[in-house]
Amino acid sequence: MKPGNDQAIFTVECSHSFYFSCIANSVKHGNYLCPICRCKWKEIPPMSSFSTDTTINNAGRTRVSLLEDQPTVSLPLPEPIHFSDDEPLPNITVDHTSSPSTIHSERIVLRAFSEFPIVAASEAVSRFVVLVGVRALPLADDARHRERAPIDLVTVLDVSGNMAGSKLAHLKQAVCFVIDNLGPSGRLAIVTFSLGAQRNFPLQRMREQGRREAAQAINSISANSGTNIVEGLKKGVRVLEERREMNPVASIVLLSDGRDTYNGDNANQHHSPRNRRSSNATSGPKYLNLLPSSICPRNSEALAADQLPTFHVHTFGFGLDHDSSAMHAISDASGGTFSIIEIVGTVQDVFSMCIGSLRSVVAQKLKLTVRSASRGVNFLNKESEV
């Protein structure tokens, strides 16, 4: 709250500002929705903080006097103990006569290129290189008019103090873009973290009502102090692990503009900003072992040699002060991607590319079986690289 042009100006958490005299009557009647973006306000000034003195100043405007040291009224959103409140998926008729391999073979093209086209029967080749290419078929001309792969997407967003201002405003705009383009079968959940973590919006389908409520949730977030990436990821994983129903594709999007100040390497640097860059930038953070095994399989007690992460985490380093080492390590451990957003205004473009690639998934956990077409040829050892 601050005075301006002889009137009190009230700036709410969605970053919109109003003359108090214009907004007071609406708030008094219980309307806590922003007239511009329609987000629901969680923090409003108590009416007792202002005198209703209607003294007219020289400019002919009503003057509102502020009463100091009045607390802000907080309206926190309740969070359930278990995140099994996801919206049910639509009923889809599945053709059980078609096997997954048949479905995938119609959408995927395999091509093999061998180092030697022919090997004589009398010879033995110790190292025989074969390059196998896997490519999805091009989308049909009418693909944009058809429903794409439905996704369960959890956005884990940094709302620490450094995100205040234009960063938070562009982030909200980018998430609203995701909301509008996820599709009616896609589901979205919103998790934010600063000092701790909070699930701001449950996993809901992005139909008309879901889009409206998700937009209200994202527009109502505000920046706070602290950066706790570990708690944000733990809560994001819980949303996917505790859901009742599952879409074919499930991913987590993590965006942060700083370093985790509560776990691992940077925990003892929380009160010393000068030392924030002293950690080794070439290795991952020590707090990686605090992450759930569903995004960091090496943390599993019963670790299998071929165990893959359950959920991919696509990380975004926002601005020039993000922890690129941590963002890269998290994405690498989970099988996701890492992107750097240096220019604040490009966050929507980067988000759109990520969502577009997720919605273009045609197969998951694809396995290739290699065998010889000639009798008497055996593979003694197989080494593979991707």
Image (cartoon, grey):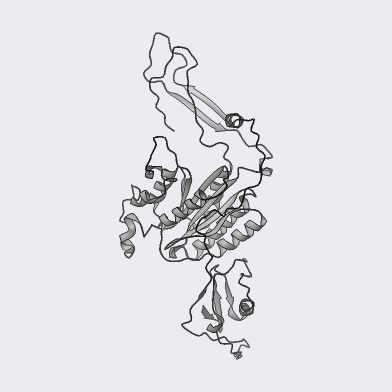
For the point 42% across and 31% down, which residue is it?
385
Image side of residue 330 versus residue 32, left or right: left
The x and y percentages for residue 306 are: 42, 35
For the point 49% across and 23% down, which residue is it?
113
Image side of residue 194 versus residue 5, left or right: left
Tell me if I can see residue 317 in this picture. no
Image side of residue 90 versus residue 120, left or right: right
The C terminus lies in quadrant:
top left
The x and y percentages for residue 283 are: 33, 47
Image side of residue 98 versus residue 128, left or right: right
Q: Quadrant location of residue 261? A: bottom left
- Number of disc labels: 0
Tell me if I can see residue 89 in this picture. yes
For the point 51% across and 52% down, which residue is it?
239
The x and y percentages for residue 324 are: 40, 51
For the point 41% across and 42% down, which residue is it?
297
Residue 210, compared with residue 271, is above or below; it is above
Residue 171, compared with residue 11, is above or below; it is above
The residue nearer to you, when weighing 358 against 112, is: 358
The residue nearer to you, when weighing 70 against 124, is: 70
The x and y percentages for residue 64 are: 57, 85
